[in-house]
Amino acid sequence: MVNKLELAPSILGGDHSMLAESVARISREGLSWVHVDVMDGHFVPNLSFGPGVVAAISKKFPGMFYDVHLMLDNPNLYVKSFADSGASLISIHGEPDYPVAETLDEIHLLGKKSGVVINPDTPVADAAAYFPKVDLVLVMSVQPGFGGQSFNDSALQKIAMLKKMREEMKLGFRIEVDGGITAQNVGAAVAAGADTIVAGTAFFKNPSSLKAAMGI
Ligand code: DX5
Ligand code: ZN
């Protein structure tokens, strides 16, 4: 495997009245990645966390790696505030109409790692031009917007395709999968080539069985 296997629990799946406890739980499980789902009510039909939340948790738990997934129509207007808030990696979708390549460059100029996200209806090829610019490619295995949905198997082919393209293009980006991950299907995602696993519902329900299924 090119990259070390990481589990990135999504705090969207934890108790929102105790966000600090969700991050503490992730840390107690010996993990460092914290996946933060940011939604604007336009690109996806839901609202979640803003930069203030990232600032508060990253101040309280400075040793964690904040993997911020922006589900916004205009992420270019917000990357600076998330970078200033303590994000470690900022992922943006390629689907909305805004300057995607320039925004990925801006994330690096801000000193952060960058990612591009591929929705279930978006072909992998549509994002390929961005691969040389990113540290991570995120494959959505559900329609973004809500936790607790079922894993869409078509993500497995996309992950395998990305792994092949990464080799052919001689790149090293991480391959992350997000949505409906459980102890039952995580093995298939890893076998296909995913090295970064997002899990909300399954992690907060039973972290040990998910970790055991991943062999971490
Ligand atoms: C969906 C989010 C996911 C979601 C994962 O828009 O991007 O990160 O919270 O949650 P589960 O693991 O419950 O599908
Ligand atoms: Zn996410």
Image: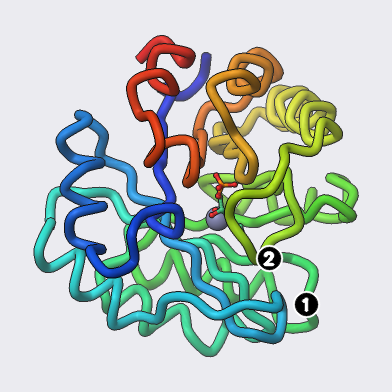
> Mark 1 highlights which residue?
96
The residue located at (65%, 13%) in the rendering is 191
Whether the residue carrying mark 2 lies under 8 Å from ligand 1 is answered with: no
The residue located at (25%, 63%) in the rendering is 19
Q: Position of residue 74 (x, y in %)?
A: 64, 86
Mark 1–mark 2 CB contact (< 8 Å): yes
The residue located at (21%, 42%) in the rendering is 25
Q: Position of residue 103 (x, y in %)?
A: 58, 75
Position of residue 121 relative to residue 30, above or below, is below
Left or right: residue 180 compared with residue 207: right
Question: CA–CA distance between discs 1 and 2?
Answer: 7 Å
The residue located at (18%, 74%) in the rendering is 56
Left or right: residue 70 compared with residue 73: left
Question: Which residue type does callout 1 highlight?
Answer: Pro
Question: Which residue type does callout 2 highlight?
Answer: His
Mark 2 lies on a secondary structure that is strand
Quarter location, residue 72: bottom right
User: How many neighbours does mark 1 have within 10 angstroms: few (below 14), some (14-19), or many (20 or more)?
Assistant: some
185 or 54: nearer the eye?
185
Q: Position of residue 145 (x, y in %)?
A: 65, 66
User: How many neighbours does mark 2 have within 10 angstroms: few (below 14), some (14-19), or many (20 or more)?
Assistant: many
Q: Please give the label number shown on residue 93.
A: 2
Mark 1 lies on a secondary structure that is loop
